[in-house]
Image: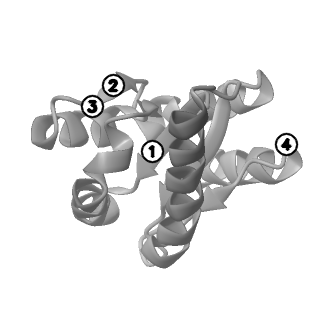
Amino acid sequence: MKKIALVAHDARKPVMVEWVGRNLDVFRKLDLVATGTTGTVLLEHYPELRLEKLASGPRGGDQQVGARIVAGQIDVVFFFIDPLTPMPHDVDVKALLRLSILYDIPLACSTRAADILLDSIRKRLAEESSTGLRSV
């Protein structure tokens, strides 16, 4: 597995922190990339994570995640979007969503969808562990 991208709008950061915390058994095994503020908040709570911080979303972080999708460096995106707050960088958010769809990258924007997607990752990690192989 390559990298997992974690992105959360400000109003959804507490939800992301709580969700990652409930799933530390998986996230401790993964290489993660996050937009700046999301990464900072996650590392404050879980400093043991292997997490690379990019720029904050409005300062180009969403575009950096998108560029990594295009380069084939991201396997999954967890993007907890705040649907009730207008975003000044809405164009960047839409571009990231578009690239996820265009490059067929699994994308979860709610905790229920994220749970389902993470269960798939958990099973894949268990299979890799039992066979001693690591997928690319």
| Pointers 1 and 2 in contact (C-beta within 8 Å) | no
Looking at the rendered image, the disc whose residue lies closer to the viewer, 3 or 1, is 3
Q: Residue at x 12, y 37 (%)?
A: 44
Q: CA distance from mark 4 to mark 2?
A: 25 Å
Q: Tell me the residue that label 2 is attached to.
A: 50
Mark number, residue 115? none
Nearer-the-camera pick, 107 or 67: 107
Q: CA distance from mark 4 to mark 3?
A: 26 Å
The way the protein has been coloured in the rendering is one colour
Looking at the rendered image, the disc whose residue lies closer to the viewer, 4 or 3, is 3
Looking at the rendered image, the disc whose residue lies closer to the viewer, 4 or 2, is 2
Kind of residue sitting beneath label 1:
Leu
Q: Residue at x 35, y 27 (%)?
A: 51
Secondary structure type for disc 1: strand
Residue 7: x %, y % from top left = 45, 47
Q: Residue at x 85, y 42 (%)?
A: 103
Mark 3 is surrounded, within 10 Å at the Cα level, by few (under 14), some (14 to 19) or many (20 or more) other residues, namely some
Mark number, residue 103? 4
| Pointers 3 and 2 in contact (C-beta within 8 Å) | yes
Asked whether residue 62 is in view, the answer is no
Kind of residue sitting beneath label 3:
Leu
Q: CA distance from mark 1 to mark 4?
A: 17 Å
Asked whether residue 82 is in view, the answer is yes
Q: Quadrant of the N terminus?
A: top right
